[in-house]
Image: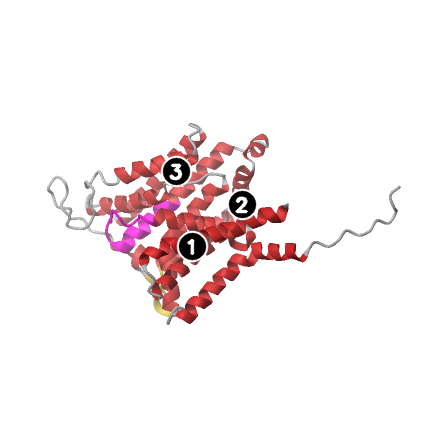
Amino acid sequence: MPQANAAPRPALPARTSLRDHAIRYGFIVLLVGMVLFFSLSTTGFTSPQSAVFILQSVSITGILALGVTATLVVGGFDLSIGSVATTAMMASSYAMVVMGLDGWTAVALCLAIGAIVGVINGVLIVYMRVPDLLATLGMMFLLVGLQRIPTEGRSIATGMTMPDGTTANGTFSPEFLALGRHRFDFFQPNLLPVSVVMLIALAILIWFFLEYTRFGRMMYAVGSNERAAQLAGAPVKAYKIWAYVISGVFASIGGILLAARLGRGDIASGNNLLLDSVAAALIGFAVLGAAKPNAFGTAIGALFVGILLQGLTMMNAPYYTQDFVKGAVLVVALVFTFALSKRGRR
């Protein structure tokens, strides 16, 4: 017969608590430590100008990463975001410089392109049952080729010579260029770029959408257990398609801002957008031990990448070492997220 008063269960080992704290706060500690290291190792790293430069450098990749986060939430992945952004950059430049359209029409055209690409990706994945990586990889190559056809691989700028020998006499709209070059007064005159404001606004928007709306919570339900969500009556296919539409639109916004910043359609400007955006979205898994895609973590991940690259640049680290360092940091972040958390659940 068991005793009436059973002995109390022993307390969990201290190492379990330490592991939990490492999972939850390890990345934040790493971020703070990195800031302190660069602050002590370089001059001017903590100045307002340096902070704004960091935010501006990650604003476009951060916006793209937020789009990737939407697809990760539903259990998908979008490899076409970099090519969508570059296509939007080239399309907006072509619309104004070659076709002579105004800036707002060019913006609307690019947003439509992003939404259409998102729908196509979603249909391929949901209805044609093409794996998400393959579908979006194919779209990436398709767009990389498509954006170069109208100019035969040339970048787009005012006064350029077209393949048929004519000269493109259109110009970039001042309102359009303001999207990439205007700065707001914040503590200091002309300090805060529009692109940074856009990143903050979109991060808050997608965070609220995913965390506090029924649509966003259902997207998480689809990503965590698609079959259960389907049995509960959720339109799973529609949610997944909408996730790719969000990703495409956000990528187009990034391309618009890039074109407005450069004042031209530079065919090679978007080469690193995909890798940096994916890194920011995946690093977001490690922020506060979330272990899931989330907008707040993605924004912190983008900031982390920007701080890391800015610090390395100010320390005169060779440019060819930066990708290696980013990869090492990403691996460490994912170890904190998955390996340690799985061991803690055993």
Q: Amino acid at mark 2?
A: Thr
Whether residue 334 sits left or right of residue 256 in the image: it is right
Q: Amino acid at mark 3?
A: Gly
Q: How far apart, in angstroms, are the residues tagged by discs 3 and 1?
A: 23 Å
Q: Residue under circle 1?
A: 302
Q: Amino acid at mark 1?
A: Ala
Q: Which residues are magenta?
A: 250-272
Q: Quadrant of residue 151?
A: top left
Q: Which x, y percent locates residue 45? A: 39, 68
Dot 2 lies on which element? loop
Q: Residue under circle 2?
A: 213
Q: Earlier in the sequence, mark 3 or mark 2?
A: 3
Q: Which mark is residue 4?
A: none
Most foreground residue, 339 or 153: 339
Most extreme residue toward the left, as rendered? 165
What is the tally of numbered marks visible in this picture? Answer: 3
Q: Residues within 10 Å of mark 2 (few under 14, many from 20)?
A: few
Dot 3 lies on which element? helix
Residue 107 visible within the image: yes
Q: Residue under circle 3?
A: 118
Q: Residues within 10 Å of mark 1 (few under 14, many from 20)?
A: many
Q: Closer to the camera: disc 3 or disc 1?
A: 1
Residue 119 visible within the image: no
Q: Are marks 2 and 1 in contact (CB under 8 Å)?
A: no
- Looking at the picture, does residue 53 appear above or below residue 101? below
Q: Residue at x 43, y 48 (%)?
A: 66
